[in-house]
Image: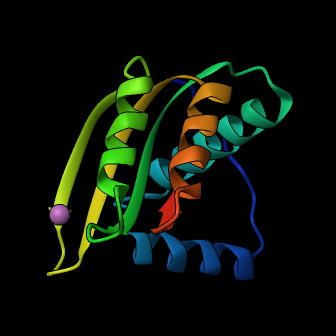
Amino acid sequence: MQRFTISLDDQLAAQFDDWIAQRGYGNRSEAVRDLFRAELDRTAQQTGSATHCVACLSYVFNHHERDLAERIISLQHAHHDLTVSSMHAHLDHDYCLETVILKGEITAVRQFADAVCAERGVHHGKI
Ligand code: NI
């Protein structure tokens, strides 16, 4: 574990303390570590230095939509190497929420997620 000291002006420090309180962090160090990790991950994805990932894909769909549930299941089976697990929740009489855990090459994971989200009747898809 390494320690270092940073200087912040009072206004930025107050904003940061408000932010970490809203997020529920117990101290500044854990909040700073999470910010570092998020930025380093984002940079790795942008520069292409990261090749593999784990991801959660969530979407809502109407299970009355013709063949949609079957099409989604077929997509998952066609990419069984990427789909680690999925969870299905019946939201109401019409709509279902699914969350799929994905693991694999970033390009393949994104293509799979895009294909699911592009299916007619799939809404609010987000990876
Ligand atoms: Ni359902």
Residue nearest the viewer, comparing 114 with 36: 114
Q: Can you tell which quarter of the image residue 82 is in?
A: top left
Front-most of 11 and 90? 90
Give the quarter of the image for residue 8: bottom right
Q: Position of residue 53 (x, y in %)?
A: 54, 27
Q: Is residue 70 left or right of residue 56?
A: left
The image shows a total of numbered marks equal to 0
Q: Residue at x 58, y 45 (%)?
A: 115
Q: Is residue 24 visible?
A: no
Q: On the rendered structure, is 68 left or right of 88? A: right
Residue 118 occupies quadrant: bottom right
Residue 96: % across, % down: 25, 67
Q: Mark yes or no: residue 111 visible.
A: yes
Ligand 1 image position (quadrant): bottom left
Which residue is the extreme one toward the right? 47
Picture coordinates of residue 12, whole percent (x, y): 72, 75
Residue 89 percent location from the top left of the image? 17, 62
Q: Residue visible at 53% across and 75% down?
A: 19
